[in-house]
Image (cartoon, rainbow, N blue to C red):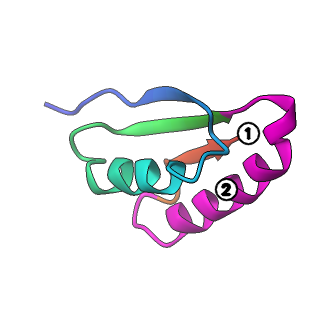
């Protein structure tokens, strides 16, 4: 049975732990198919959020789920 894709919001998306979280989502995509991953942070963390968000986009771009796994911030 195919699993229904989900949307996930990560509060504190500019954290240095976020790439590790994204890596886990990529590795477990078959068990937890993610359609959208939203990265959210406070205004003071906006610059870090942009950096971490761009890194997460590059991580997803290199995987086979690139077309169905979208990261937004």
Q: Residues within 10 Å of mark 2 (few under 14, many from 20)?
A: many
x then y, percent, for residue 57: 62, 59
Q: Which residue lies at the image location 63% right of the left edge and 64% below the top edge? A: 55
Task: Mark 1 vs mark 2: give the one in front.
Answer: 2
Kindly identify which residue carries mark 2: 52
Q: Nearer the viewer, residue 68 or 41?
A: 41
Q: From the image, which quarter does the N terminus lie in?
A: top left
Q: Nearer the viewer, residue 15 or 54?
A: 15
x then y, percent, for residue 18: 52, 48
Question: In the image, 25: left or right of 11?
Answer: left
Magenta highlight on residue 60: yes
Region rendered in magenta? 40-65
Callout 2: SS: helix
x then y, percent, for residue 14: 67, 45
Question: In the image, 19: left or right of 47?
Answer: left
Q: From the image, which quarter does the C terminus lie in?
A: top right
Q: Which residue lies at the image location 34% right of the left edge and 39% below the top edge? A: 33
Kindly identify which residue carries mark 1: 73
Q: Residues within 10 Å of mark 1 (few under 14, many from 20)?
A: some
């Amino acid at each position: 049975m195919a699993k229904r894709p989900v949307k996930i919001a990560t509060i504190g998306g500019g954290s240095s732990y976020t790439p590790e979280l994204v890596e886990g989502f990529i590795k477990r995509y078959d068990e937890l198919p993610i359609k959208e991953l939203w990265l959210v942070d406070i205004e003071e963390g906006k610059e870090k959020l942009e950096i971490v968000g761009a890194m997460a986009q590059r991580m997803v771009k290199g995987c086979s789920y690139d077309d169905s796994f979208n990261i937004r911030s």
